[in-house]
């Protein structure tokens, strides 16, 4: 197997540039390697990715199927508790202060606080969402976790998992329907 230094030993360190448009005998004269006419031969050409010269592009010819939830995903800027360890005791943390310290690029998305790291200082944190471990660590240190409305943050209830019911057999369903009719009325 050849090594990098074996391959590159024969190469020139200062390779001469290809001089285009310097006569037919150079092999790069006249059209300078651009072919004849068309947008590729023009100055400042830009052919976007997927363009097929006016023919309907492959991504438009292919059938579109299915559905994606990507457009409806809840997005957050993530900040860990370890990132907040440099703050002073009793300080207020919100999106504006996180942007100022450089932990978050801007306030376009809400901030989510995760529980990676320890909190030893009493912090008043206002954020869009808190993980269970982060909420526990903040309250244990004596701080406050507030939602964007300024109220105390509470973790949302877990959604009920859908359980498929067993389908009743037709004979059993008919017996159940006939049983109440047979009972005498009081």
Image: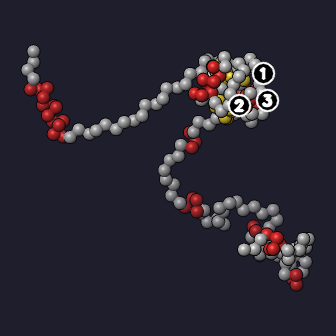
The quadrant where residue 129 appears: top right
The quadrant where residue 145 appears: top right
Of callouts 3 and 2, the N-terminal one: 2
The residue under the point 79% across, 30% down is 101
Q: Residues within 10 Å of mark 3 (few under 14, many from 20)?
A: few
SS of the residue under disc 3: helix
The residue under the point 61% across, 66% down is 55
The quadrant where residue 57 appears: bottom right
Residue 137 is situated, as x and y percent measured from the top left of the image, at 63, 24
Q: How many marks?
A: 3
- Report the colour scheme: secondary structure
Q: Residues within 10 Å of mark 1 (few under 14, many from 20)?
A: few
Q: Quadrant of the C terminus?
A: top left
Residue 122 is situated, as x and y percent measured from the top left of the image, at 71, 18
Q: Which residue is mark 3?
A: 100
Q: Nearer the viewer, mark 3 or mark 2?
A: 2
Residue 82's disc is: 2
Of callouts 2 and 1, the N-terminal one: 2
Q: Is residue 31 above or below residue 97?
A: below
* Residue 41 appears in the figure: no
* Residue 119 appears in the figure: yes
Q: Nearer the viewer, mark 3 or mark 1?
A: 1
| Tags 3 and 2 touching, CB below 8 Å | no
State the residue in front, 123 or 172: 123
Q: Is residue 69 left or right of residue 89?
A: left
Q: Is residue 162 left or right of residue 90?
A: left
Q: Which residue is mark 1?
A: 88
The residue under the point 79% across, 69% down is 4
The residue under the point 62% across, 37% down is 75
Of callouts 3 and 1, the N-terminal one: 1
SS of the residue under disc 1: loop
């Amino acid at each position: 197997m050849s090594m990098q230094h074996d391959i590159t030993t024969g190469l020139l360190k200062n390779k001469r540039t290809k001089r285009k448009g310097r006569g037919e005998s150079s092999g790069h004269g006249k059209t300078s390697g651009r072919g004849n006419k068309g947008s590729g031969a023009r100055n400042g050409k830009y052919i976007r990715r997927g363009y097929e010269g006016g023919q309907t592009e492959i991504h438009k010819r292919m059938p579109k199927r299915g559905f994606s939830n990507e457009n409806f995903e809840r997005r957050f800027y993530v900040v860990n508790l370890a990132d907040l360890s440099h703050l002073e005791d009793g300080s207020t943390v919100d999106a504006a202060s996180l942007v100022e310290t450089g932990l978050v690029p801007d306030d376009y998305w809400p901030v989510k606080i995760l529980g990676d790291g320890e909190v030893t200082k009493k912090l008043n944190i206002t954020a869009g969402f808190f993980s269970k471990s982060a909420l526990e660590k903040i309250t244990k240190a004596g701080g406050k976790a507030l939602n964007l409305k300024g109220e105390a943050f509470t973790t949302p209830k877990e959604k009920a998992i859908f359980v498929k019911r067993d389908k009743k057999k037709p004979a059993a369903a008919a017996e159940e329907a006939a049983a109440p009719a047979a009972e005498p009325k009081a």
